[in-house]
Amino acid sequence: MPTMTIAKALNEGLRAVLDNDPTTLLMGEDIGELGGVYRVTEGLKKDFGALRVVDTPLGESGIIGTAIGLALRGYRPVCEIQFDGFVFPGFNQITTQLAKLHTRSDGMLSAPVVIRIPYGGGIGSIEHHSESPEALFAHTAGLRIITPSNPQDAYWMIQQAVTCQDPVIVFEPKRRYWLKGDVDTSAPASDPFSAHTLRAGTDATVVAYGPLVPVALAAANAAEADGRSIEVIDLRSVSPIDFDTVTASVLRTGRLVVAHEAPTFGGIGGEIAARVSERAFLSLEAPVIRVGGFHMPYPVARVEEHYLPDIDRILEALDRAFAY
């Protein structure tokens, strides 16, 4: 199996869909000649031409609006939003138009648009280049939201997003773009909207997604030195959420910590905590504990390490869970 970075795996996944489906096209700011800020689309314009890999004006509302029109005409556009904080000029198009077209037309229309959004911090950048707005979109029914944490998932999930009949937002953890891993390009891909148990454990469950999955795994390894067996689940899909996998784990372990970079207030972790409390109340040995960013604008790069959840904060949450 070839070894790739997440960025390269996304590039190869996009190449595969461009090869296999002539109705697929890519569009976004600087994705053609430059190959994107993170070079995810590097080389694709050269191989597929300017009509399939389109450099757009700097206007996210126009990018999304054009993609909706293309989708209604039978195309499968894949939009790149250059940075997470740049998506908000297109927020209205995504949440009031794209997400609702299928229902509004009583199922007669579909809009298979994919929106790629690099998200999260850890790259020493400024606020509108380091945010985690996934909960804002997960609140809107009609959107599917996935986030790969490794190259294998990145390669397959971007292809599955393109073939999905529903609009899909792919949140790509930008500080993990250079994370390497083996990619099996021949293996059948699993359901992109299901969670994966990456590490089995018996004493507590840690759920994470996107950029915090490596942190959760490192925390579980550190906890093992204290004699604690921690199960780690990669959520993979933020909407829909695979509550069955999470609940089954908590029924065995009795404790749950949910970790994400986005602020805990109003975040995905709160929804998971509420659902698990309903489903597994009598099995819980402690309250569900959330670990996330603080309820504040993303800080300047010099102090972002104090904002981002790290191994120590997950371990501290586990200590609190075991203290009950």
Image: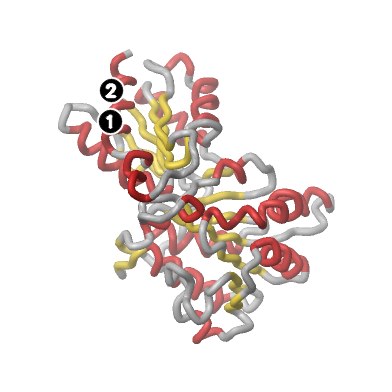
Q: Secondary structure at mark 2?
A: helix
Q: Residue at x 60, y 42 (%)?
A: 136
Q: Residue at x 56, y 65 (%)?
A: 80
Q: Residue at x 54, y 46 (%)?
A: 133
Q: Please give left or right for residue 160 compared with residue 222 in the image.
A: right
Q: Nearer the viewer, residue 280 or 96?
A: 96
Q: Quadrant of residue 305?
A: top left
**Please, is residue 142 above or below residue 228 in the view?**
below
Characterize the local packing of mark 1: few (<14), some (14-19) or many (20 or more) Cα atoms within 10 angstroms.
Answer: some
The residue beneath circle 2 is 319
**Please, is residue 29 above or below residue 44 in the view?**
above
Number of marks present in the image shown: 2
Characterize the local packing of mark 2: few (<14), some (14-19) or many (20 or more) Cα atoms within 10 angstroms.
Answer: few
Q: Please give left or right for residue 56 compared with residue 103 in the image.
A: left
Cβ–Cβ under 8 Å for marks 2 and 1: yes
Find residue 191 and name its label. none
Q: Quadrant of residue 115?
A: bottom right
Q: Could you say where residue 47 lies in the image, as x and y percent from the top left?
A: 50, 86
Q: Could you say where residue 98 lies in the image, as x and y percent from the top left?
A: 72, 55
**Please, is residue 149 above or below residue 260 in the view?**
below
Q: Residue furthest left?
A: 225
Q: Nearer the viewer, residue 191 or 290?
A: 290
Q: Residue at x 55, y 45 (%)?
A: 134
Q: Could you say where residue 216 lies in the image, as x and y percent from the top left?
A: 32, 40
The residue under label 1 is which amino acid type? Leu
The residue under label 2 is which amino acid type? Asp
Q: Quadrant of the N terminus?
A: bottom left
Q: Secondary structure at mark 1?
A: helix
Q: Nearer the viewer, residue 171 or 185?
A: 171
Find residue 315 and name its label. 1
